Amino acid sequence: MSETVFIAVIAGLLALDDRAGWQSLLGEPVFAALLVGLAAGPVGPALRCGVALQLVWLSIGAARGSRRPNVVVGGLVAAGAACGVLERTGDPRELFVVATAVFCGLLAGEAGAVVARVAGGGRERWLGRFQLPAEAGAASRRLVLTTTASALYVALVDGIFVLLALPAAVFLTETVTGRLGAAAAGATWWLALLPALAAGTIVHAFATRTLARFAALGLLIAGVASWLL
């Protein structure tokens, strides 16, 4: 339970960075999953979740536009589920557990995006009613308080969602991996094909652009990091 709360706190902080802060990209799945691995362990499975989800969501970024999945929530839920199940059960089928956790992360990312949009609509309506007082000192205080409350609201929404979604993902991952035997091989292949197809989509999208070499470099770094850890 303490690890779930800790990951929920991470979700809130990364949500601030991703949508209400300086956008350092720490909320991207490959980095968020690494934070979970370092905090809850083991690092390897967590990073595998992050790399897979990073490639998938990069591959649909241009098509989805602003209606992207909640990558902060998805990456943390997937990595947290994989680490939690492996630590609790000691299942030797690590790739099978990771594949199931990645699936949970995909679901959590989509659900988290819906929740964020609904919650964001209420936040925007509240901000739309904002009015500055005539007195300069009161206006400054009101502006600081409103900005702070708006940012904390974003963090709170993602934190609560992860607090609820992570135990559900752990339960689903543990249930699926505990009851399926022969299907483990298929899930392992799915885990290999999913990021491979996503990587192919990314390469195709950048094939005629000058950024192609940067995409290839990023893919190489992610692959080497995943192999080393």
Image (cartoon, rainbow, N blue to C red):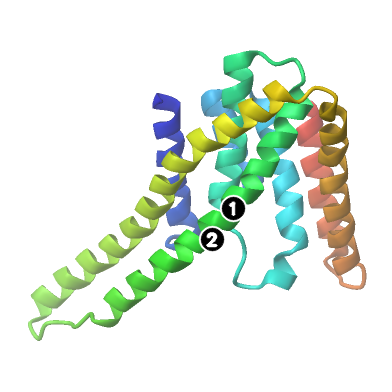
Mark 1 — residue? 109
| Residue 18 drawn at (x, y percent) | 51, 58
Q: Amino acid at mark 2?
A: Ala
| Residue 150 drawn at (x, y percent) | 31, 64
Q: Which residue in the rendered view is the most extreme toward the bottom?
A: 134
Q: Using residue 81 as the reference point, say whether residue 18 is left or right of it.
A: left
Residue displayed at 38% across by 46% down: 160
Q: Nearer the viewer, residue 137 or 206?
A: 206
Q: Using residue 134 as the reference point, say whether residue 35 is left or right of it.
A: right
Q: Nearer the viewer, residue 152 or 25?
A: 152
Residue displayed at 32% across by 78% down: 125
Q: Which residue in the rendered view is the most extreme toward the front?
A: 179
Q: Secondary structure at mark 2?
A: helix
C-alpha distance separating marks 2 and 1? 6 Å
Q: Mark 2 and mark 1 in contact? Answer it, CB < 8 Å.
A: yes
Dot 1 surroundings within 10 Å: few (below 14), some, or many (20 or more)? many
Mark 2 — residue? 113
Q: Is residue 45 visible?
A: yes
Q: Nearer the viewer, residue 76 or 100?
A: 100
Residue displayed at 71% across by 65% down: 61
| Mark drawn on residue 199 | none
Q: Secondary structure at mark 1?
A: helix
Q: Is residue 28 visible?
A: no
Residue displayed at 48% across by 49% down: 14
Q: Using residue 31 as the reference point, say whether residue 14 is left or right of it.
A: left
Q: Nearer the viewer, residue 21 or 42?
A: 42
Name the image quarter holding the N terminus: top left
Q: Amino acid at mark 1?
A: Gly
